[in-house]
Image: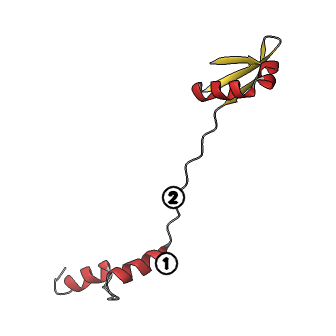
Amino acid sequence: MTALTIRELRQSWPAAEKALQEEEEIVITRDGAPVAKLIRYSEPKKRRPRFNAKKHLALLRKDSGGKIFMHGDAMLAADRADRVF
């Protein structure tokens, strides 16, 4: 961790910027007491797009060639219709 005075920061910003690339943070001091912390900026991660049911259904229809399949519950009911419980 590097410490710089406010005067050093104002007078030699390029050196402070270079030090910030090597260090995670720089402590800014005034009269020997810390007053601020300068940290390196990093781009936030981009969020994944939300699930869109309509687009998903369109993709499924495109992949299946426009054929409509029975729902899983309907397939199980038709398969078990001849059984006696």
Can you say which quadrant of the picture contains the N terminus?
Answer: top right
From the viewer's perspective, tell me whether residue 70 is left or right of residue 38. Answer: left
Q: Residue at position x 71%, y 28% from top? A: 14
Q: Where is residue 21 in the image (x, y as percent from the top left)?
A: 60, 29
The quadrant of the rendering that contains the C terminus is bottom left
Q: Residue at x 79, y 10 (%)?
A: 32
Dividing the picture into quadrants, the one containing residue 37 is: top right
Residue 13, quarter of the rendered image:
top right
Which residue corresponds to the image point at 17% horizontal and 83% vertical from the top-left?
84
Residue type highlighted by circle 2: Arg
Is residue 79 depicted above or below 41 in this figure? below
Q: Is residue 45 above or below residue 16?
A: below
Does label 1 or label 2 sit earlier along the sequence? Answer: 2
Image vertical order of residue 23 relative to residue 58, above or below? above
Q: Residues within 10 Å of mark 2 (few under 14, many from 20)?
A: few
Disc 1 crowd, CA 10 A, few/some/many (<14, 14-19, 20+): few
Query: For mark 1, what is the residue?
Result: 54
Residue type at mark 1? Lys
Here the colouring is secondary structure
Q: How far apart are marks 1 and 2 (CA)?
A: 17 Å
Q: Which residue, given by chain and number where applicable, does mark 2 sit on? A: 48
Q: What element carries label 2?
A: loop
Residue 56, position in %: x, y? 44, 75
Query: Which one is in front, 52 or 3?
Result: 3
Q: Residue drawn at (47%, 76%), measured in percent from left and top?
A: 55
Q: Residue 42, how many percent across, how many down?
A: 60, 40
